[in-house]
Amino acid sequence: MAGVQMMPAAVDVRAEGGVAALRRSRVGAAASSASAVSTTSLFVGDWRRRPRRPSFSVRALRQGRSSRTSRGGLGIVCNLGGQYDDTFDDVQLQLMNYFTYKAVRTVLTQLYEMNPPSYRWFYNFVAVNKPTDGKLFLRALSKERQELAERVMVTRLHLYGKWIKKCDHGKMYEMISDENLMLMRERLMETVIWPTDDTNTEKIG
């Protein structure tokens, strides 16, 4: 039958022409084994070849990760860069509070020069009600002195308009980048262990 390896018959070496018969039997056995391997290699694989490494593609890896994630598996997420969908509402609130504080200082300076009684009253009010929260501060001020509250609101809007015209976002980015680099350099200088003079000197005698 095809695909079945047949063992060669025993050969009597002592008989006449035993060497030639032995050679013929070896050749026949090799031929039969080769035919058997070539026949069975279609089903069990070629034993003379090494198994190939499985090939993976980027698409297959991504599909596998997405499928594992959709099934509730573990997924690796990098949070070092933060979330890119932030609206920076907190930054806008801090800007409004800062310009309220700056407007309060400006109004205090103007009142000190032009209206000392109003300056003393406003100074005492600011000492009790800190302008850290601009909305709460202006709400409390409007209940006491409506004209001063409106003056602070107009002043902070004017100061913000001046800042928008003078603000250089490219320069601001460069300043932040330079400061980050300086801080990292300072930290590196603190952690480096410098060699002392004793390590380079040699004892004589």
Image: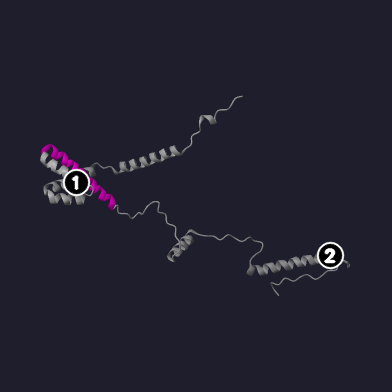
Q: Nearer the viewer, residue 199 or 2?
A: 199
Q: How many marks?
A: 2
Left or right: 74 as drawn, with respect to 113: right
**Residue 77: where, in percent of width, then height?**
42, 56
Q: Which residue is mark 1?
A: 128
Height in image: 203 above or below 128? above
Say which amino acid is labelled 2.
Ala
What element does badge 2 sit on? Answer: helix
The x and y percentages for residue 198 are 53, 30
Q: Is residue 67 magenta?
A: no
Quadrant into which the C terminus falls = top right
Provide residue 181's location: percent of width, then percent of height.
Answer: 39, 40
Residue under label 2, please give it: 20
Circle 2: is it few (<14), some (14-19), or many (20+) Cα within 10 Å?
few
- Quadrant of res 158: top left
Which mark identifies residue 165? Answer: none
Q: Is residue 193 left or right of residue 123?
A: right
- Outermost residue toward the bottom in this view: 1
- 191 or 178, which is in the foreground? 191
Per the rendered image, the range of residues in magenta is: 89-114
- Chosen colour scheme: one colour
